[in-house]
């Protein structure tokens, strides 16, 4: 699974990663547009800018035996896991055909078959849950590894610290991924963290870790692949801090006035899609026409998702009382 | 039948379910090497090993959430809190995750887990260690809440709770662990959601559950000595609530007293009293009475802490009030 640092990814595989990132980008843009049209309500946390993290990491695991457990900015993980954009858009629209029957919303995408366990709206609440899934993998000796996603805001919750301690003492096969997008809502992580390098947090529980450039999907893929091999092979937790950046506000209602336009522009120059696209073009693996075709395809998928959501029925009133208890 | 203490009956349930199904694991503080803070899990580590009887650090939020994740992935964890007082550290995991995961995922994920431990007033423990927290958990749809009053029900309800595909809060009582009673051997299951009529009577229905059941039965005998024939209903499950059993009794006796250890504001007891008032309105000959814990934090002083709880005298007085006796 893991590839050496200097080894070039297979051309087809690179194209797959590029297309998955592009699909997330176009899906999120469409979601923002639909939010503006009031087709989508409530909280809606977009993944634009962070695509390389979900796509690179999830490409490095095997969802037949591995798991992904994330937080509320979950559209990217869901798409990277291969969930149907139509069901996701319908969920955002609150329709009966949504992946959670219209009762979860943006923060609660799930797919039992794809081992995608959310989608969690409470900051850090998914970290013990993910650790419990890893306990199952360890207990069953089923070779499974868990990707546990959280942000630079969640890392100061007790749930993070309690979980890492137990994962270490019980040798659980889990990769704790701190997606550091620099801001916990409107708060610069440097203002609220005792350390600038979150790897220190993992190491304080005896869990090895490293920082990863989250704007480079190939690097994310390699590092998560190596971490998964270690977690699986040695049955041990691993920590990764994926440095990334979100282009939009914390949620659709956040104008993001706490950062400068210059900062945002500097990150847009390291855009994960742009980086991979340029690399592929330079290597003669992608033409402008190839990219345009790929982009058109992703846009068509998102248009189709919107049409599906629009045409889908509202949940029956009886759905209110369903799925509460077995 | 054999005579067992409450703790032995709970242990038998755990032992039998762990022997029956290897997806059942037990985790919590002191459950393994120490054999349980209240000795419920005594001998289970030796029998099932450290991968199934797991000693945790003092991290209630963490190990409660770990149990939930393991349940979502296919295990059937039993999480023991040393007491329900410490479950407050884990409320977010119980309320935000265990109770809602099935609903939020459109029915995709079950959370088959039991959270158990001692609950309710004990003795000389003060405010933080002596409280009845069932009303908190009974508030949330998506959770089942069970509170047995006898060793036999303890065994039968715990076995049923472990096999249930929902999160179940299983409330024991610190003051009951040494209580002895007849317990059926082997496969003894008590379905969740069924009340038990502990004493038949025609004059007044007294609805209660958990530790106060014994005191209510004593009160019924005291009332009998005065010619008042009380029917006593042990709810056993608070969620789901066996409303039919309550109403069937009240429509015959036309009078109802609810006895509940929890504090009165927005409590299980106040809810049951409201249900009876609403649904038996035409059959009631008196307003429903509620005997609850007093609306105070539990004091340390023994006379004061007894005064803060339901007593035989308070129960008898309430029954007389609804009978205008």
Image (cartoon, coloured by chain):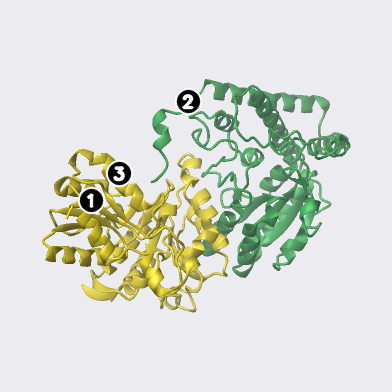
Name the foreground residue: B19 vs A38.
A38
Say which of marks 3 and 1 sits in front. Answer: 1
Mark yes or no: residue A297 visible. yes
Question: Is B90 on the left or on the right of A199, as rendered?
Answer: left
**Mark 3 chain:** B
Using the image, determine if residue B136 lies above or below residue A305. Answer: below
Give the drawing colour for chain B. Answer: yellow
As drawn, B242 above or below A35: below
**CA distance for labels 1 and 2:** 44 Å
Could you say which disc has been placed on residue A314 in the image? Answer: 2
Residue A325's x, y, as percent? 39, 45
Q: Is residue A180 left or right of residue A100?
A: right
Mark 1 or 2: the one toward you: 1
Q: Are marks 3 and 1 in contact (CB under 8 Å)?
A: no
Q: Which residue is mark 1?
A: B256
Q: Which chain is represented by green in the image?
A: A
The residue indicated by pointer 3 is B275
The structure residue drawn at horizontal position 67% and vertical position 50%, both measured from the top left corner, is A150
The chain letter for the residue carrying disc 2 is A
Mark 3–mark 1 Cα distance, whole angstroms, equals 11 Å
Q: Chain of mark 1?
A: B
Q: Residue at x 21, y 65 (%)?
A: B219
Report whether B221 appears left or right of A203.
left
Q: Tell me if mark 1 has few (under 14), some (14-19) or many (20+) residues whose alpha carbon lies within 10 angstroms of its own.
A: many
Q: Residue furthest left?
A: B227
Image quadrant assignment for residue B123: bottom left
């Amino acid at each position: 699974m893991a590839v050496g640092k200097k080894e070039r990814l297979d051309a087809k595989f690179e194209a797959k990663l590029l297309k998955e990132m592009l699909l997330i980008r176009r899906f999120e843009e469409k979601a923002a547009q639909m939010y503006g049209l009031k087709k989508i309500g409530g909280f809606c946390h977009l993944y634009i800018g962070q695509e390389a993290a979900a796509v690179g990491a999830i490409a490095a695991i095997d969802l037949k035996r591995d798991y992904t457990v994330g937080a509320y900015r979950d559209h990217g993980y869901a798409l990277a896991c291969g969930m149907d954009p139509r069901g996701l858009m319908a969920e955002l629209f609150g329709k009966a055909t949504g992946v959670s029957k219209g009762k979860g919303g943006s923060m609660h995408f799930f797919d039992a078959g794809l081992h995608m366990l959310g989608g969690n709206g409470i900051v850090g609440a998914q970290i013990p849950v993910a650790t419990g899934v890893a306990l199952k993998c360890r207990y069953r000796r089923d070779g499974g590894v868990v990707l546990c996603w959280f942000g630079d805001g969640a890392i100061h919750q007790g749930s993070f610290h309690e979980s890492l301690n137990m994962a270490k003492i019980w040798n659980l096969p889990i990769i704790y991924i701190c997606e550091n997008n620099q801001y916990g809502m409107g708060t610069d992580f440097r203002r609220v963290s005792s350390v600038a390098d979150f790897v220190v947090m993992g190491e304080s529980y005896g869990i090895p870790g490293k920082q990863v450039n989250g704007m480079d999907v190939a690097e994310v893929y390699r590092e998560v692949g190596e971490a998964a091999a270690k977690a699986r092979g040695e049955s041990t937790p691993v920590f990764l801090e994926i440095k990334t950046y979100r282009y939009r506000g914390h949620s659709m209602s956040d104008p993001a006035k706490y950062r400068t336009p210059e900062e945002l522009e500097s990150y847009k120059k390291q855009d994960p899609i742009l980086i991979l696209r340029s690399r592929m073009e330079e290597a003669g693996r992608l033409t402008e026409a190839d990219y345009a075709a790929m982009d058109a395809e992703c846009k068509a998928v998102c248009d189709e998702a919107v049409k599906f959501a629009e045409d889908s029925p509202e949940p029956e009133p009886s759905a209110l009382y369903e799925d509460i208890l077995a | 039948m054999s005579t067992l203490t409450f703790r032995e009956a709970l242990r038998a349930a755990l032992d039998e379910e762990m022997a029956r199904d290897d997806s059942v694991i037990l985790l919590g503080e002191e459950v393994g090497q120490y054999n349980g803070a209240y000795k419920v899990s005594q001998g289970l580590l030796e029998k099932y090993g450290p991968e199934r009887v797991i000693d945790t650090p003092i991290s209630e939020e963490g190990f409660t959430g770990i149990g939930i994740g393991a349940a979502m992935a296919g295990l059937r964890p039993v999480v023991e809190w040393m007491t329900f007082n410490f479950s407050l550290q884990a409320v977010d995991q119980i309320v935000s995750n265990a109770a809602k995961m099935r609903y939020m995922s459109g029915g995709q994920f079950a959370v088959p887990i039991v959270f158990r431990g001692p609950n309710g007033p004990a003795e000389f423990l003060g405010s933080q260690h002596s409280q009845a927290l069932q009303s908190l958990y009974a508030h949330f749809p998506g959770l089942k809440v069970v509170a047995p009053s006898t060793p036999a029900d303890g065994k039968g309800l715990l076995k049923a709770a472990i096999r249930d595909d929902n999160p179940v809060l299983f409330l024991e009582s610190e003051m009951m662990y040494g209580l002895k009673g007849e317990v059926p051997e082997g496969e003894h299951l008590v379905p969740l959601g069924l009340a038990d009529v502990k004493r038949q009577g025609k004059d007044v229905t007294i609805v209660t559950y958990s530790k106060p059941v014994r005191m209510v039965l004593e009160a019924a005998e005291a009332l009998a000595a005065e010619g008042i024939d009380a029917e006593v209903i042990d709810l056993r499950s608070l969620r789901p609530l066996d409303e039919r059993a309550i109403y069937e009794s009240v429509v015959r006796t036309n009078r109802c007293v609810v006895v509940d250890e929890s504090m009165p504001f927005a409590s299980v007891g106040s809810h049951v009293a409201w249900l009876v008032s609403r649904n038996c309105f035409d059959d009631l000959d008196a307003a429903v009475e509620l005997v609850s814990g007093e609306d105070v934090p539990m004091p340390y002083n023994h006379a004061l802490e007894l005064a803060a709880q339901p007593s035989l005298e308070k129960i008898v007085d309430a029954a007389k009030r609804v009978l205008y006796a």
